[in-house]
Image (spheres, rainbow, N blue to C red):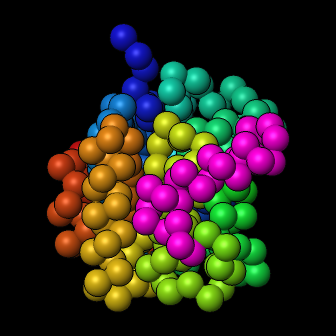
Amino acid sequence: MTAPVVELRGIGRTYEGPPEVVALRPCDLVIARGERVSVVGPSGSGKSTWLNLVGLLDRPTTGDYLLDGVNTAELPDSARTELRSRRIGFVFQSFHLLAHRSAVENVMLGLLYQGGKRAHRRSTAMAVLDRVGLTACAESAAGVLSGGERQRVAIARALVAEPSLLLCDEPTGNLDSGSAERVLDLIDGVHRDGQTVVIVTHDEHVAAAAPRRVVIRDGLVCG
Ligand SMILES: Nc1ncnc2c1ncn2[C@@H]1O[C@H](COP(=O)(O)OP(=O)(O)OP(=O)(O)O)[C@@H](O)[C@H]1O
Ligand SMILES: [Mg+2]
């Protein structure tokens, strides 16, 4: 049997302060391969804290986190960075693209850890841009694209290295409703193709699209 993508064993995070803040109380949670999960909760409940731990952007103050069965608690920072680059694709509310680089160059950045020939990285990036419906925009600077197009480029960049986990933080937060719908359809499609997806969101419509919901309240994770 293969290991779950995410296995949290009693992980918690306290910010030292002062004042000390218990942002996440120790929690156990398993996310299996191919699941789609939404993470919801009121402002200040601990969603970003949780996302930063699961995304290997921060270390827990207690507990163990296994990503694809690898215990990340035991790894030095360099190995955690490599694991993050290879196994986690991030999509943020504000896209985080390089505005003066073309769409395809932005997607190629997702392959930096893979190395290999530039021509090969370029053709891989073009294939993923095609999957998100943006072949025609490949050579356009990211800065001239619409919000919805930018987010689809960001999704292509997140997927190009074939991560174990697609981790989205309010992916539709900066989009008009039409573009948001298109981005959600795209996420739907990659999930149907087998991608494990976690979406942190305030938006009930976005949350409702996922079959499983994790609720965080006052640092307590349920679900
Ligand atoms: N670096 C930090 N140092 C100290 N306290 C922090 C830090 N980051 C977050 N906190 C506190 O931890 C708690 C959880 O914050 P967190 O940012 O995880 O909430 P959130 O659910 O993401 O909120 P929002 O929906 O507003 O983004 C809050 O009380 C917050 O003030
Ligand atoms: Mg937050």
Q: Position of residue 111 (x, y in %)?
A: 70, 47
In the image, taking residue 216 as reference, residue 70 lies left or right, namely right
Q: Main secondary structure of the magenta part?
A: helix
Examine the rendered structure and indicate whether residue 104 appears above or below residue 178: above
Quarter occupied by residue 10: top left
- The answer to whether residue 143 is left or right of residue 41 is right
Residue furthest out toward the top: 1
Q: Toward the viewer: 216 or 87?
A: 87
**Residue in the picture at 38% in, 75% down:** 172
Q: Residue at x 34, y 61 (%)?
A: 186
Residue 158 % position (x, y): 56, 54
Magenta stretch containing residue 115, yes or no? yes
Q: Residue 65: where, in percent of width, then height?
A: 53, 33
Instruction: From the viewer's side, name the closer residue of 146 and 171.
Output: 146
Q: Residue at x 73, y 43 (%)?
A: 120
142 left or right of 40 in image:
right
Query: In this rendering, is residue 100 above or below 71?
Result: below
Look at the image and say whether residue 208 sits in the magenta stretch.
no
In the displayed structure, would residue 20 be above or below residue 74?
Answer: below
Q: Can residue 46 be seen here?
A: no
Q: Quadrant of the C terminus?
A: top left
The quarter in which the N terminus is drawn is top left
Q: Quadrant of residue 42?
A: bottom left
* Residue 136 visible in the picture: yes
The part of the image, by quadrant, that contains residue 61 is: top right
Total numbered badges shown on the rendered structure: 0
User: Residue 46, how many percent across, how many down?
Assistant: 44, 62
In magenta, the rendered stretch is: 111-137
Instruction: Please tell me which residue is depicted at 31% across the width and 72% down the height of the picture.
Output: 182
